[in-house]
Amino acid sequence: MGAQIRVYRQKISSTSSMRKIFKAMELIATSRIGKARSRVAASAPYANAITRAVSAVSSQSEIDHPLTTEPEQIRRSAVLVMTSDRGLAGSYSASVLKQAEQLVELLREEGKEVKMYLSGRKAQAYFDFRSREYAKVWTGGTDNPEFSVAQEIGKALLEDFSTAYEDGGVDEIHVVFTQFKSMVVQEPTVIRLLPLEVVEEEVTDQAELLPLYEYEPEPEQVLDALLPRYIESRIFAALLQAAASELAARQRAMKSAGDNASELIKKYTRLRNNARQAEITQELTEIVGGADALSAS
Amino acid sequence: MAELEVEIVAADHFVWSGAASKVNARTSDGEIGVLPGHSPVLAVLAAGELSIEPVEGSRFTLQADGGFFSVDKDRVVIVADNAKLDDTVTAGNR
């Protein structure tokens, strides 16, 4: 009987030390979300300015830039998957990977080869464990991405995009990341990064009408300089959104882990009290029984 | 048409915005000066110095290593990679 009480005591103390860890991780995630969200907001002016400029150039000048023209036949696609470096974030990485798997399957059904690019150690582990191939991986700092990483990714993707199919290049690029909609809703999303989709639309509002720009040097060169920046800024925006989502997912996972730990502690405390009471009762019965037996003899 | 509305942004942060009377920038072709009433331009910036003359306060410069800028109805948007304010300008009077 005494052994049972000891087991419960051990369980209670180990669960409460785990609860401390969960609480700490929850607090850390909560404090970082604010910063991650303000970084998402801070990158918006740059992205807006670039988007406006790109749409101005591509809508006014009749340039067939390789980045904006749809290839006749798409034979190989690149898929960039953004997961986290660390776990303990609930289903965050798993749901991104699931979304990526669906996309890959869809692309394969369309008869396209797929080339994988990964960001985050979780994606790397997933692919390594299944001994599947990937072209390149970036790890470290997924919860606090630097612009230089986005530049690196952008450069690698653009290089592959501008390589011919025969030399191992790709014809289109997809990105799978988690969109941060609010603190409670984060959605795994797929966007097609390249080629850019040129959408024709009629603008009725005079203020929205893009002016006829003069270009310096030439429209082609301006577009040449703009598009890589546009790609980098899109990738950076996706990385920032993914980071904010990762932290939100981690906070939620840690909160429910902490709640579960409290629940367990409560349960074990009850069981321990029960066992202690049972032990006392048994001891009493034994004493009373012993005294009875002595007086009867 | 008295002043330019200037906005300077870098990749991950906002740098400066405010009213200015003149903006000087270096493009890949050469120097360009923008005064109020300039025709719309979209140009690629070369690495170098940008100088801005705000309506209030004194002229300041900043370093950029590439980017682009657009001028559109007295609205100047400068998008610079790694823009750094040179001296201790009271950053951002938004």
Image (cartoon, grey):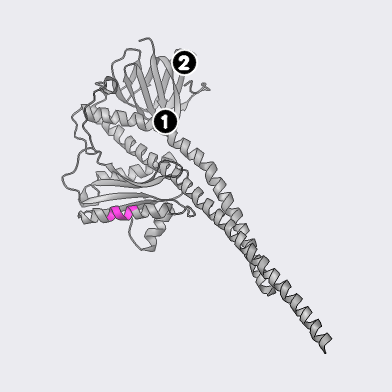
Subunit ID for the residue under disc 2: B
- Identify the residue under disc 1: B10
Q: Main secondary structure of the magenta part?
A: helix
Q: Which residue is mark 2?
A: B59
| Percent position of residue A198, x then y | 23, 35
The verdict on residue A100 being magenta is: yes
Q: Is residue A256 above or below residue A243?
A: below
Instruction: Give yes or no for residue A101 being in the magenta stretch.
Output: yes
Precedes in sequence: disc 1 or disc 2: 1
**Extent of the magenta region:** A99-104
B59 left or right of A199 in image = right
In the displayed structure, A85 sits above or below A148; it is below
Q: Residue B61 appears at what percent x and percent y?
A: 45, 21
- Is residue A67 or residue B25 the one in the foreground? A67
- Same chain letter for marks 1 and 2: yes
Local packing at callout 2 (Cα closer than 10 Å; few below 14, some 14-19, many 20+) is: some
Q: Most extreme residue toward the top, as rendered?
A: B2
Residue A229: mark: none
Residue at 38% over, 46% down = A187
Disc 1 to disc 2, C-alpha distance = 20 Å
